[in-house]
Amino acid sequence: MDENVKLAIFDIDGTLTDTNSVDDECFVKALSEAHAITEINTDWATYPHATDSGITLQIFQETFGRDPEDPELDKFKSCFVKMLSEQYHSNSSSFTAIAGAAVALNRLKRESDWAVAIATGCWRESALLKLRAAEIDIDGIPAAFAEDGLSRDEILQSAVSQSLEQYRLSSFAKTVSIGDGLWDVRTARRLNFAFLGVGCGEPAAILDRAGAKHVIEDFADYGRLLSFLNEAEIPRVECLA
């Protein structure tokens, strides 16, 4: 691949898969079942790091006054994945793909001037479960998860590093982060990455106010996606009004 290649980094929940609700529900229930932690603030945007690793760390610090130990993390993650799996088998409609996501991802992989990566704040095992459930194949795509860092910044930087190595490049001509959360826009701005938002209604308006130049509802129109990726810019300063 040549040095004109651009990198598109996709989030998972709310971006490739419509799984924000089931993920939140199972995350909260797993903390309760594994560690008897209840009364959790689920406004993830208020956490310093809106990632599974960052949120879990803060909740443990607030609840127990210390960081979680490895066996405690393992117990929580195992419980979380078990609950997601049970939820999938009882209600698979909670794990649908965002319209056009699977096809768009595969088509973009074949573009000569684009490379594709995944960067999510989710734990690896839970993320892969949701992608499989939504029938989205990321085989061969560089991917970074909550295990790769506490912050979104670290996780996206890990995805870039993996991509440079896999695609045998020293740099990308442009890097575009594709996400649905307020934290996604802010992370892109901090890292000087271009950004493309995914959402509709009020969530889309939030991304727009946060500085996204373009926000798409889904990936059904591949030509529109490609156009917006090429036009994507580093998010402008947020409108706080």
Image (spheres, grey):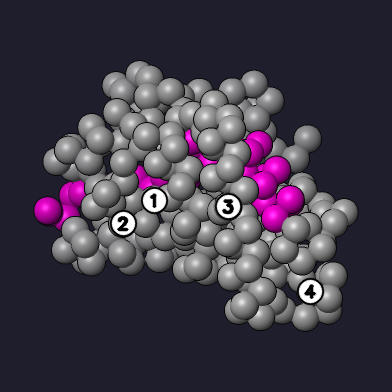
Mark sitting earlier along the chain (3/2): 3
Q: Residue placed at 72% from the left, 63% from the top?
A: 34
- Vertically, is 223 above or below 97? above
Q: Amino acid at mark 4?
A: Gln
Can you give x and y, in whole percent of width and height, for residue 19 in the image?
A: 57, 37
Can you give x and y, in whole percent of width and height, for residue 208 in the image?
A: 60, 32
30 left or right of 157 in image: right
- Vertically, is 116 above or below 53? above
189 left or right of 47 in image: left
Q: Residue placed at 82% from the left, 62% from the top?
A: 37
Comparing labels 1 and 3, the label whose residue is closer to the camera? 3
**Secondary structure under the numbered disc 1 in the rendered image:** strand
Which quadrant of the view contains residue 211?
top right
Name the residue that disc number 2 marks: 142
Name the residue that disc number 1 marks: 118
Q: Amino acid at mark 3?
A: Lys
Q: Quadrant of the C terminus?
A: top right
- Residues 33 and 174: in front is 33
- Residues 81 and 152: in front is 81
Name the residue that disc number 3 marks: 82
Circle 2 packing at 10 Å, graded few (<14), some (14-19), many (20+), is: many
How much space separates mark 1 and mark 3, taking CA atoms?
Answer: 23 Å
- The label number, if any, that marks residue 61 in the structure image: 4
- Magenta range is 1-30
Comparing labels 3 and 2, the label whose residue is closer to the camera? 3
